[in-house]
Amino acid sequence: MQINHSEIKDLTSVVTLTLTPADYEEGVTKQLRQIRQKADIPGFRKGMVPIGLIKKMYGKSVLADVLNNMIAEQLTKYIEEQKLHILGDPLPNDELTPSMDLDNDTEFTFAFDIAVPAEFDAKLTAKNKLTHYTITVDDKMVDNQVQSYAARFGEYVDADKVEEGDVIRGTLTEQKEGGIVKENAILNPQYMADKKQAKLFNGAKANDVITFNPMKAYQNETEVASMLDLKKEDVKDLNSDFTFAITSITRHKDAAIDAELFAKVYGADAPKDEAEFRARVKAEIEGNMAEDAKYKFGLDAKAAILKKVGEFALPEAFLRRWVEATNKEMKKEDLDRDFPEMLNQLRWQLAKDQLMKEYEIKVEKEDVDAYAMEVARMQFMQYGMMHVEEQYLKSFADNILKDENQLRGIVERVAENKIYEHLKGVAKIEEKAISYDDFGKLMKE
């Protein structure tokens, strides 16, 4: 096989592969013999069909199959041996590929376009300054989290009269003949948009009857429809007053800050007293804040890397062809809109690849599993499940990793985090303490 590689010009070049009978005949003969062994043709015993007939029947398709496989294998091998850092995949060059006659030709030539990025340097040095923040956890933050736990594990109790935040039940009756009646209706006046309407319920007791206007109170058709158990279109013209005959009042009562609460929050390994509980809460907040600071450091590090590499040249015409070839369903207008961002994402990916190679960073299975566990832990925490047993977290994490898109995303995050961590020993790092409020302002900026 003869392989020619043109000079790289405008970040693209052409690789031409020429195959002669010496390259492909053995493969063709082998496949034809395999077909002969299995061929079941009337008039011949199985495995005894003349090879000439097999060649006449299948020779052209077998030749095409062997040529395609050899070209793919040899092109990949050449790129690896030459250590070519190509973008996308090689694309057939129809202009430089001669037309083929599989019946008569014995020599076949295939041409492919390949592309490479311009030279760039993504490595940071001690000249690059980055700030690593430590978010201060004060008593107020601990107080708020303790109160949050007390509220989460609190309970609803009966109340004598309505106060702000109470939930009241009763019968809603529209004040007109044949009007709407809704038994066992539920109201929470604090969510009423019109505070004058909400005040009508202040101090009310069980068996009191309050007259109010739902549409004035909520000023939202969806909420009124939900309260009356009706469709939104059914309340579009509803302007009537209603009476609300109160049957019960319930109030949320925070849990006491005691051993029972400590056990509900932390399980069997619960703190023994309030001081230990607050210390555990503070450590928990500090851990969460450390993750936020880590995220901010990653954002800043990524910005520094992208600033270092700049908008280095890419073979845009080739890349458009490649996207079109691999995304047949993509419309031209969508490609025109998304292409600039695709180039930005590609530059970032190339920068990461260079840094991982430079710093000898590898993403191991253990790293991916650990990150998936953290993703699972965070998802449980969103639903108030703060301390899920490891076996359940692992099961959930394993399910996450079965999704190829989520797995790919986790591998990318792990790689980026390893790069950012390595940069702490390369760039000039300023350690800076910052309050939670000031950190929030920083993130908004």
Image (spheres, rainbow, N blue to C red):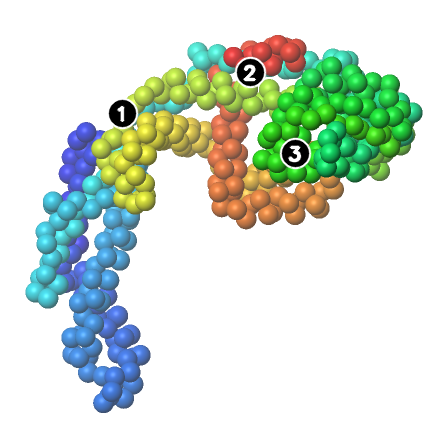
Amino acid carrying mark 3 in the image: Ala
Q: Earlier in the sequence, mark 2 or mark 3?
A: 3
Circle 1 — which element? loop
Q: Cα distance, mark 2 to mark 1?
A: 31 Å
Residue at the spot of label 2: 443
Is residue 361 visible from the viewing direction of this image?
A: yes
Instruction: Place residue 354 in its image quadrant.
Output: top left
Q: Nearer the viewer, mark 3 or mark 1?
A: 3
Q: Is residue 185 left or right of residue 335?
A: right
Task: Give 380 or 372, whichever is nearer the viewer.
Answer: 380
Closer to the chain start, of discs 2 and 1, is: 1
Secondary structure of the residue carrying tag 2 is: helix
As shown in the figure, which amino acid type bears the numbered disc 1?
A: Ala
Mark in front: 2 vs 1: 2
Residue 108, labelled with which disc? none
The numbered dot on residue 313 is: 1
Q: Position of residue 349 (x, y in %)?
A: 39, 31
Q: Residues within 10 Å of mark 2 (few under 14, many from 20)?
A: few
Q: Could you say where residue 393 lies in the image, as x and y percent from the top left? A: 68, 42
Asked which quadrant contains residue 442, the reply is: top right
Crowdedness near tag 3: few (<14), some (14–19) or many (≥20) residues, C-alpha within 10 Å: some
Labels 2 & 3 near each other (Cβ < 8 A): no
Would you say 230 lies left or right of 272 here? left
Residue depicted at x 26% and y 52%? 72
Place of residue 405 in the rendered image (x, y in percent of width and height, measured from the top left): 48, 42
Say if 23 sits above or below 121 in the image: below
- Secondary structure of the residue carrying tag 3 is helix
Q: Residue sitting at 32 percent across and 21 percent down?
A: 311
Residue beneath label 3, please?
A: 225
The answer to whether 75 is drawn above or below residue 68 in the figure is: above
> Which quarter shows the N terminus?
bottom left
